[in-house]
Image: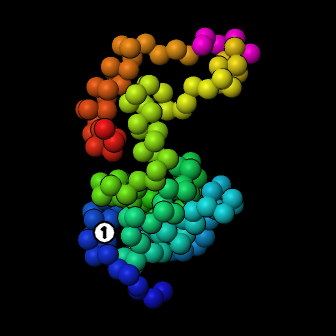
Amino acid sequence: MRRTAADPDTERWLERTAPRASACQQCGECASVCPSQRQGGIRPAEIMARAAVGSLRPDDPALWLCARCMSCSERCPSDADPGEVIASLRERAAERGNLPPYLLDEAERFKKTALCFPRTGMTKKMRKELGLPDGEVSERAVRECGEIIRRTGLGRFVRE
């Protein structure tokens, strides 16, 4: 594999946070079970190869296509743990402020409403049909979510 667009900082960081990444043998077992890859999304074997040679940047949008089902890590015969490598790279991306807009929107919604999804007429109707309560969130719950946001550092991703 040719080494291109290397990011030495990320390579060193990955060696510390996911040392098993270099154990990947490119056998393709991860690819065979990845539901995202089957739908045209992330390609775990490619991510592992690029991570191993330092040519994967933490702002690569492919990182956010992973469903985090961990099937890749369960299937990996070399214990390279592709799911954790991808999670580590996502953390690195988040630390650098490289998050997809839909996640930023979700974080803002969570801060304002204590919900990660919009309450629409359709969701209210579905809840009623299922015999569930309306899903109204109390002011106390919103304040508690605000505290969670503050303590976890999520607030740095939320636009004021």
Decide if residue 74 is in sight here: no
Residue at x 50%, y 47% (from the top left corner): 102
The extreme front residue here reads: 160
Is disc 1 surrounded by few (<14), some (14 to 19) or many (20+) residues within 10 Å? some
Secondary structure mostly seen in the magenta stretch: loop
Query: Residue 34's spot in the image, x, y percent?
Result: 62, 58
Task: Name the image colouring.
Answer: rainbow
Front residue of this view, candidates 25 and 94: 94
Query: Residue 44's spot in the image, x, y percent?
Result: 54, 65
- Quarter of the view holding residue 123: top right
Residue at x 61%, y 26% (from the top left corner): 120
Quarter of the image with the C terminus is top left
Along the horizontal axis of the image, is 136 left or right of 141?
right
Q: Is residue 132 magenta-colored?
A: yes
Q: Is residue 53 above or below residue 140?
A: below
Front residue of this view, candidates 104 and 49: 104
User: Which residue is label 1 attached to?
Assistant: 10
Q: Is residue 122 magenta-colored?
A: no
Along the horizontal axis of the image, is 4 left or right of 122?
left
Which residues, given as a range, are shown in magenta?
129-134
- Quarter of the view holding residue 60: bottom left
